[in-house]
Image: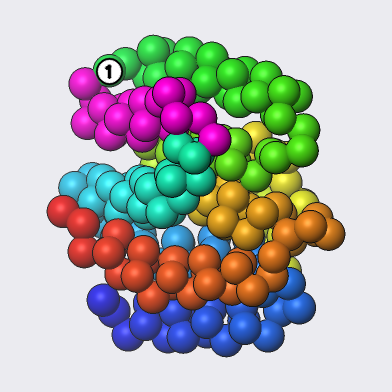
Amino acid sequence: MSDALQELIRKGLSLVEEEPQHDLKLGFRCHLLSAFNEIGSPEGRRTSHRKKVKLAVLAVTKVLPLWEGLFATDRTPHHALELAEKTFAETISPTTAEKEVGRLWTHCDDLIWKHEGNQSPIMVGYGAIQAIREALSERHFGRAHVNDQSTDLDIQPYDQDSSFFAAAAYSNGAPWESKSNAQQRLEFWTWWLMSAVPSALNAT
């Protein structure tokens, strides 16, 4: 891991500790992810893309038990994570992947309406779907107009990334929701910075 990335991780730990809701803001996450990029050959760009997909998968895998506890027989996030891997490996077509994104997103929307009092586990499903979208493009969706102070409230829900949805699942809601648990959010983002990011960077 480069010195620059190590410094970004240290900065992220400080920021998430100091932020009132212990949120790791979108702007900082995008800045950190941009440091994954390896300028130069197509092989280098593909390696960087692979690491970002791996980070998305790791974030969702962390919270899969929350989905499984509510939907024991529904394999939606598992299927989505498999599709993310196949999409990146180009063993399925982008058209097929995009159709599945739409179908699975609609399924999660339906679950939201049916489980109004217990929606946070469904964030796991959305996060897994976004891993497919991460695999579809080297340039991550939703980051074009993000600055250092941007939060996830500044972009459309369909552009929020896998890690945001995983954090919302883990902490029982987004930072702006009164029922969410800030201490659990701190725990998630600390894990993300200390474990998930280094693991993704070491992915081959």
Residue 41 seen in this snapshot:
no
Residue type at mark 1 is Ile
Which residue does the numbered mark 1 point to in the structure image? 92
Asked if the magenta segment contains residue 98, the reply would be no
* Residue at image location 45% in from the left, 30% down from the top: 72
Question: Could you say which is closer to the camera, residue 73 or residue 33?
Answer: 73
Residue 71 highlighted magenta (yes or no): yes
Q: Is residue 106 above or below residue 52?
A: above
Q: Secondary structure at mark 1?
A: loop
Q: Is residue 200 left or right of residue 185?
A: left
Residue 29 appears left or right of 117: left
Seen at 77% across and 38% down, the residue is: 117
Q: Reply above or below: 150 against 8.
A: above
- Please tell me which residue is depicted at 61% across the width and 25% down the height of the picture: 108
Query: Which residue is drawn at the image coordinates 73% and 59% (left, top)?
Result: 180
Q: In the image, is residue 94 above or below residue 193?
A: above
On the image, the x and y values in percent for residue 73 come to 43, 23
For the image, the number of numbered tags is: 1
- Colouring of the image: rainbow
The chief SS type of the magenta part is helix
Q: Mark 1: give few (<14), some (14-19) or many (20+) Cα within 10 Å.
A: some
Residue 114 in sight: yes
Residue 71 screen position, x and y as percent = 51, 30
To which quarter of the image does residue 81 belong? top left
Residue 90 is left or right of residue 124, and the answer is: left
Specify the farthest residue to the right.
Answer: 178
Q: Quadrant of the N terminus?
A: bottom left
Q: Which residues are magenta?
A: 70-91
Please identify the quarter of the rendering in which residue 105 is found: top right
Q: Position of residue 25 (x, y in %)?
A: 65, 66
